[in-house]
Image: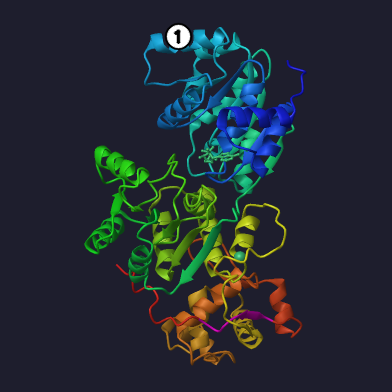
């Protein structure tokens, strides 16, 4: 419908004029260019990466209207207010408006007075709305939080399935743009398929924002760590995510007692209290927000200096989304994950609590497994993260994550690896981590004896170590790809091809120091 080609220079002018930013961020530029060339585009960017500008700038250049599908009523209003303040004509339509207000806004769009119109996805299912929209000149449909179309994602919304039929119902097919912060391959596939993007350009960017120093700390006394950290950073805004309300309340009380300006946020508080606490955090009246994962969707606070995870989240998508709330202003910030083996039990328990079965459940377990592998990884955490999301990277270690900063010497662990791998082999790759650890420890455990594992040559070959230490070591080998775990509630350890090379003496296994002292592990999190 429009043949004119707009240049990125024009887009830059608009960016400077309305937003006052000197330039696009790297990822934004590619997406804006793609949309200006009229291509369907999928943009995957971390929270805070600057997705909204990717469709707002093309909206200002393209003729006609850009329709923005957005899932959250509160976000819609904030976005429209921000645009209006900048002198951009925008409006939203949602259930908070009267029929007359809705009509007025549609009329305004019809007169060409609006560049952007935000709507909730449910709206697209209504016949009368489709008819009204068919009369407008819509150049672009931008779908925000596009992962909501996928059942694999964590925020499935049925009404997102109506985006594609809605777009088809329009007399002229607009450019389709989709945005999300979280995408695994399955979710990406769903978005492309279910939103029916046509020959789309896909851009995955900035997951490894280089101002974020990622750390995974194993075996810390979590509570002590949090108390010390918040005291040492008392002037900086930060978020602490904990798995349960109880844990949030408990940490919150302790921080208050220690004189730290803390607030809390979870689904057990009244709407009013949640809103007040959120506000206080946004305006720096409190420094630390202790929260469950209920906190954060749609929070735009740019100067969060740290995000601490008191517990391991259920998967990498959730982790990246939550950790990504740190450092949106591009200043150096920390993302710290306090991991303990207890967290694995908690997440498994939550999966079992969930009524879903079959593929969904297997998927949850698989994702949990990948999250655990991240926690045990000795490699650059930014690599580990980027690879998980299928983003290409330049093979240069980030230099600031806990693995890169780990100054412990690399030690030759080939001998330990051989003992463990050979034990797994002799147990016919049919048991889980703790059973293998028991055998290596030389445990008199009934099951060990019952299977006759006490007669294996590897029985008791690691008896100087605790079973916990042996388990940690096995998990590290899993994270480093020597071993794999099957899916499900009781995963079985198996050898990967490279393990055979290790057993044959053709591959040396180098690792950081033998093992962290396990003495303090989990003491902070036991309930
Ligand atoms: P997202 O929707 O991806 O979470 P936003 O669109 O809300 O991110 O943008 C996050 C922050 O980054 C906002 O404060 C925004 O003003 C800022 N921002 C976006 N693009 C740029 C840019 N090109 N230059 C400077 N700041 C930017
Ligand atoms: Zn690194």
Q: Is residue 195 visible?
A: no
The quarter of the picture showing ligand 2: bottom right
Q: Is residue 504 above or below residue 480?
A: below
- The residue to which callout 1 is attached is 104
Near-viewer residue (446 or 16)? 16
Identified at 60% across, 56% down, the residue is: 210
Figure coloring: rainbow
Residue depicted at x 44% and y 32%: 75
Task: Confirm if mark 1 falls within 8 A of ligand 1.
Answer: no
Above-or-below relation of 295 to 412: above
Q: Position of residue 280 (x, y in %)?
A: 31, 44
Asked if residue 511 is among those painted magenta in the image, a careful observer would answer yes
Q: Please state if 198 lies on the left or on the right of 344 as rendered.
A: right
Question: Residue 5 versus residue 520: which sits nearer the camera?
Answer: 5
Magenta extent? 509-515
SS of the residue under disc 1: helix
Quadrant of the image containing the C terminus:
bottom left
**On-image quarter of the N terminus:** top right
Q: Residue furthest left?
A: 257
Please name the residue shown 73% across and 26% down the image: 38
Image location of residue 59, percent across then percent down: 62, 24
Q: Tell which of 430 and 367 is nearer to you.
A: 367
Residue shown at 47%/51% (left/top)?
A: 322
Q: Is residue 142 left or right of residue 79?
A: right
Is any atom of residue 162 visible in this view? yes
Question: From what the image shows, is residue 52 above or below residue 516?
Answer: above
Q: Is residue 351 left or right of residue 167?
A: left
Give x and y (percent) for residue 49: 57, 43
- Residue 299 spot, x, y in % from top left: 42, 41
Residue 284 drawn in magenta: no
Q: Residues within 10 Å of mark 1 (few under 14, many from 20)?
A: few
């Amino acid at each position: 419908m429009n043949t004119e080609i707009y240049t990125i220079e024009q887009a830059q002018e608009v960016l400077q004029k309305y937003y006052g930013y000197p330039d696009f961020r790297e990822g934004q530029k590619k997406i804006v260019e793609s949309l200006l060339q009229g291509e369907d585009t999928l943009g995957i960017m971390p929270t805070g990466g600057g997705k909204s500008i990717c469709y707002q700038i093309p909206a200002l250049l393209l003729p006609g209207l850009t329709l923005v599908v957005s899932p959250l009523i509160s976000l819609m209003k904030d976005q429209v207010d921000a645009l209006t303040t900048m002198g951009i004509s925008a409006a939203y339509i949602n259930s908070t408006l009267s029929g007359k207000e809705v009509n007025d806004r549609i009329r305004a769009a019809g007169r060409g007075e609006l560049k952007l119109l935000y709507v909730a996805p449910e709206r697209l299912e209504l016949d009368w709305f489709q008819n009204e929209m068919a009369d407008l000149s819509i150049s672009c449909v931008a779908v925000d939080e596009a992962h909501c179309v996928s059942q694999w994602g964590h925020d499935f919304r049925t009404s997102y399935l109506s985006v594609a039929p809605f777009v088809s119902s329009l007399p002229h097919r607009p450019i389709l743009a989709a945005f999300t912060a979280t995408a695994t391959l399955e979710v990406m596939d769903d978005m492309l398929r279910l939103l029916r993007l046509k020959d789309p350009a896909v851009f995955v960017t900035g997951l490894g924002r280089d101002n974020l120093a990622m750390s995974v700390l194993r075996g810390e006394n979590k509570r002590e760590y949090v108390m010390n950290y918040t005291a040492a950073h008392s002037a900086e805004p930060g978020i602490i995510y904990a798995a349960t309300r109880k844990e949030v309340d408990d940490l919150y009380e302790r921080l208050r007692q220690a004189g730290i300006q803390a607030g809390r946020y979870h689904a057990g508080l009244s709407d009013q209290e949640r809103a007040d606490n959120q506000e206080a955090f946004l305006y720096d009246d409190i420094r630390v927000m202790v929260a469950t994962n209920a906190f954060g969707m749609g929070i735009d606070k740019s100067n969060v200096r740290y995000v601490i995870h008191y517990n391991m989240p259920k998967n990498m998508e959730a982790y990246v989304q939550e950790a990504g709330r740190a450092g949106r202003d591009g200043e150096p910030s920390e993302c710290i994950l306090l991991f303990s083996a207890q967290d694995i039990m908690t997440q498994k328990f939550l999966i079992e609590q969930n009524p879903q079965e079959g593929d969904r459940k297997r998927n949850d377990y698989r994702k949990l497994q990948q999250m655990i592998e991240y926690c045990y990884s000795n490699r650059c955490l930014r690599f580990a993260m980027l690879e998980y999301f299928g983003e290409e990277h330049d093979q240069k270690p980030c230099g600031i994550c806990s693995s890169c900063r780990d100054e412990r010497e690399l030690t030759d662990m080939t001998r330990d690896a051989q003992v463990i791998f050979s034990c797994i082999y002799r147990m016919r790759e049919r048991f889980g981590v703790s059973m293998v650890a028991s055998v290596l420890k030389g445990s008199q455990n009934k099951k060990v004896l019952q299977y006759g594992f006490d007669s294996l040559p590897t029985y008791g070959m690691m008896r100087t170590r605790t079973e916990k230490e042996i388990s940690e070591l096995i998990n590290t080998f899993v994270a480093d790809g020597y071993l794999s775990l099957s899916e499900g509630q009781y995963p079985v350890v198996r050898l990967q091809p490279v393990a055979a090379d290790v057993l044959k003496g053709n591959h040396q296994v180098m690792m950081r120091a033998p093992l962290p002292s396990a003495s303090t592990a989990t003491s902070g999190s036991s309930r």
